[in-house]
Image (cartoon, rainbow, N blue to C red):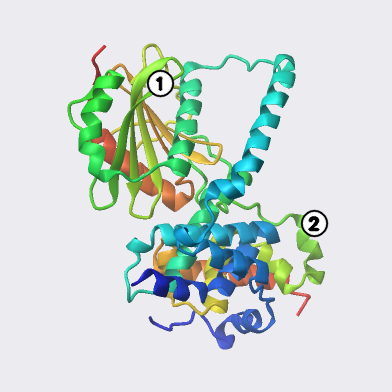
Amino acid sequence: MADDEFRQQALQHLDALHNLAVYLTRNGSEAEDLVQETYVRAMRFSHRFQPGTHLRAWLFQILRNTFLTFYRLRERESALSEDGVPESEAPMFHDAPSRDSESAGAHMDLDRALTKLPEEFKTPLLLAEVEGLALEDVARIMDCPVGTVKSRIFRAKERLRGFLKDYQ
Amino acid sequence: MTTEQTNGPEDDGGMGRLLRERLTRHPAPAMLRATVREALEPRAARQPWWMLWGAPAATAIATALVMLLWIAPSLPSAPATDPAQLVVRAVLADHARNIFWGETRTDVVPAALPRAMAESGVALNWVFTGDEDIQLINAKATYLEGRRGIELAYQDSAGHTVTYVIVPGGSVILPERGRVQIDRWKPVVRKENGFSLIIWRQQNLLCVLASDLVSDEDLGRFKQYFVKVRSSTDPYVTY
């Protein structure tokens, strides 16, 4: 794919990338930085993109990897167990909602509820349900099996329902 | 592209529909759109970087130097720590440099390896040069905490950089805490400053593998990379 064509097609997904970036970073300026970095990397590695494959999914994958690489460093690391390996069942990066915040869930709107989800739940939920990506594409972006994606989306919805139980 | 959707209103209580219909969308601001568009322009069409950043950078450096001269004498000195920890921190600093400024130079690796071995004093009987998952992209001599050694940089198919540093270990003793069984070895696995580290002793050498693969799934991949380099690299000190 020619550079010009690649550039034009990549720009068509700017709004969707920015939307995901906002929900990941929960910060407008960081979201903009993340999107810019995503495009810079996409151009740098554009030779690796295989024409005919899903450009939108490829850009989402770069955005998520960039987020995990750079922006997550600012957040608290997940606790390590005695053997130095993170607990597999614990959310990977974010804290679970506290009791106080759960009790405030009655008044929580959908946006705020979504930001409380751990990244590994929030991203597949947004990609599949809001952006309409196929589960296979989401699995590629998340670098995990399709079954894991389904499970995470299911659990994400369960948690959202919990946050919103008195809101709807 | 397949169009399988995860759930419908009938089996998830309408949560998917609720998200599609009620969730606030955040379209890119006009300023961001313009910035991205400009960033994607071919390089020749843009101003040289030094015209944009030259003056602010020079000012920042001058200010930083003045502040350093003014503040440095009153700074407390860092407490002494164990040799392994000092080396690990130095490796992380190198790894960060590899991430930010590393270049893919696969074509020069075969030439760089003998030179790196000669300069570092760490020779490699065998070296893992890569496979379909991860490729050796650079090799150079390094100097960490008074130890001359060799640094190999790899890049995996997802674009993650993995830095492999081998320095003389001398009397460095690795802690028992944090040891994890990986294949037939039991190295120390640790997370520090947002990076994953695998540290082990090999004969009289201290070896450190650093990466930004930190999530549960990524850590599994990182351990596979460890097995590859550990089983296919045989270093020894020549000085």
| Three-letter code, disc 1 | Tyr
Judging from the image, mark 1 belongs to the subunit labelled B
- For disc 1, the marked residue is B143
x then y, percent, for residue A72: 58, 49
The answer to whether the residue labelled 1 contacts the one labelled 2, judged by CB atoms less than 8 Å apart, is no
Considering every residue shown, the one lying at the far bottom of the view is: B10
Q: Is residue B2 left or right of residue B5?
A: left
Judge whether A3 appears above or below B203 on screen.
below
Q: Residue at x 43, y 39 (%)?
A: B98
x then y, percent, for residue B59: 68, 36
x then y, percent, for residue B214: 48, 46
Residues A81 and B127: in front is B127
Question: Can you tell which quarter of the image residue A78 is in?
Answer: top right
Do the residues at pointers 1 and 2 share their chain? no
| Tag 2 secondary structure | helix
CA distance separating discs 1 and 2: 50 Å
Placement of the N terminus of chain A among the 4 image quadrants: bottom left
| Tag 1 secondary structure | strand
Whether residue A136 is visible here, answered yes or no, is no
Identify the disc placed on residue A100.
Answer: 2
Judge whether A15 appears above or below B8 on screen.
above
| Three-letter code, disc 2 | Asp
- Count residues near mark 2 (Cα–Cα under 10 Å), then give few for <14, some for 14-19, many for 20+: few
Q: Is residue B188 left or right of residue B23?
A: left
Whether residue B77 is visible here, answered yes or no, is yes
Q: Residue at x 52, y 81 (%)?
A: B7
Placement of the C terminus of chain A among the 4 image quadrants: bottom right
